[in-house]
Amino acid sequence: MSGRILVVDDIATNRLVLKAKLAASYFEVIEADCGQAAIDIARAEHPDVILLDVMMPDMDGFTVCETLKSCPETSHIPIVMVTATLSSDDRMSGLEVGADDFLIKPIDDLALFARVKNLMRVKMMFDELRLRDATSREMGITDFLDSMTREDDNKSSVILAPPDAKTGQEWCKAIDPNLNVDILTTDSEHEVLNLAALEHPDAYIVHQNLIGGGEGLRLVSTLRARLDTRQSAIVFVVADGTMETAARALDLGASDYIVEPFDPNELVVRLRSQLRRKLFSDQLRSNMRDGLRMAVIDPLTGLYNRRYAAQHMNKIVDRAKAENGEFSVLMMDLDKFKTINDKHGHDAGDYVLKEFARRLQENIRGVDLVARIGGEEFLIVMPDAGRMVATHVSERLRRAVESKPFVIDNGDKLDITVSIGVALGAADDCDIDDLMKRADEALYKAKSNGRNLVSFYASAA
Ligand SMILES: [Mg+2]
């Protein structure tokens, strides 16, 4: 995995040492020699990970970290604080300002690479999600910012897998008053997997040794591999105090680790940042799902849009060919729709479109495709429907619109009518563009013959 790493240190030798190690593993390294330079370069270059010295003359690492993490442009870039000494207080202040991890000088290679690779993976996943989200937003499909304001309403759930019941209680005691989460506790690997399938928790805290049966590292690997738990956060608790274990956990897919013995507050802060990250990625994902839905649905009427209709018509045609069947294409246009907007306003116009869509759906079969393909233009494609069915249905639709006035918000009753053009398709005559054109021609005829009419395309032959 290659990526770009920003190394920040006021001492040139320190930068050189790190650069040599990282470059040997094919990472691209950029450098900053003070806090302000770090902020400027991070903003301009968007590195994948930042290794940030804590002690610097112009600005300490905590301030740099806080600045970068509070700016939307750079908040997603993982930051590892690098320091010669790390008191428990320092560690907490680092976590509070958003640091993702710490490395102690002189830097242990195993710790360095395990962390950097893990953070880079996380960042790549987020970059991809952010990119897709940006695309949907550019297409006008999702409004991401709206959905970002709900963090407090979301109660997360966490499964604790402590080594024993007493430790589980201690973890609970630390987490419960500080985070808005539902907590389930079990010290058996098997139980965790059972609970996971039932509860779909947002995060797990997994201890290296599970007294109730099983093994922490294997559990991490299983949780990562399973489809229903893949997106959850996992904080791994290292019991043997070795970096080998921590590195292995990160490699297997743990999102974070903490080494025993630890300050319970540190567990809380690490869990909190994992839960935030999870919520954020959930929102991006669900925006995308909505986005996909919205890509084929007309938001005003809930009918399919032109894009979907074009795709689906191919299927109807294929079936007609395969079964030597027939089908009908109905093109519809609300009569004098523009005057409704002009006279009664756009809200009234929207209401008429929605109500019209509803009446359409009430009067067709489940297999028929209904789509809004333009402002007041609608399309119905009816598989397995020849002239008789098409006549019957289009007349019924015309009457369903004419027979009952549309009542707008202020109580006004609007008399609405629709013109319908019909073209008939068959296995040996099913070019979609042709059929659409014919239906359009028929529609034009209905309009010019006085509107509120059904008209069939009549071929010259
Ligand atoms: Mg320094």
Image (tube, rainbow, N blue to C red):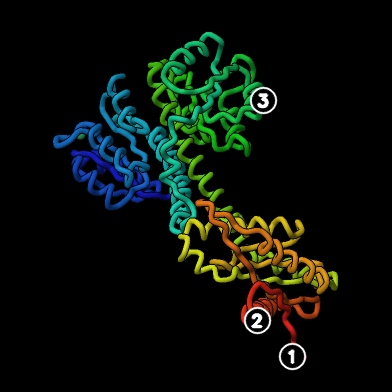
Q: Position of residue 6 (x, y in %)?
A: 30, 45
Instruction: Give the mark nearest the N terminus, 1 or 2.
Output: 2
Q: Is residue 219 visible?
A: yes
Q: Residues within 10 Å of mark 1 (few under 14, many from 20)?
A: few
Residue depth check, mark 1 versus mark 2: number of the one nearer the observer:
2
**Lateral position of residue 408 relative to residue 7, left or right:** right
Q: Position of residue 86 (x, y in %)?
A: 28, 23
Instruction: Give the mark nearest the N terminus, 3 or 2.
Output: 3
Look at label 3 and name its amino acid. Asn
Report the residue at 78% width, 71% height from top: 391
**Lateral position of residue 380 relative to residue 170, left or right:** right
* Residue position marked by numbered label 1 in the rendering: 460
User: Element type at marker 2?
Assistant: loop
User: Element type at marker 1?
Assistant: loop
* C-alpha span from label 1 to label 2: 19 Å
Q: Which mark is residue 449?
A: 2
Q: Which mark is residue 423?
A: none
Q: Is residue 299 visible?
A: no
Tell me: residue 341, above or below residue 245.
below
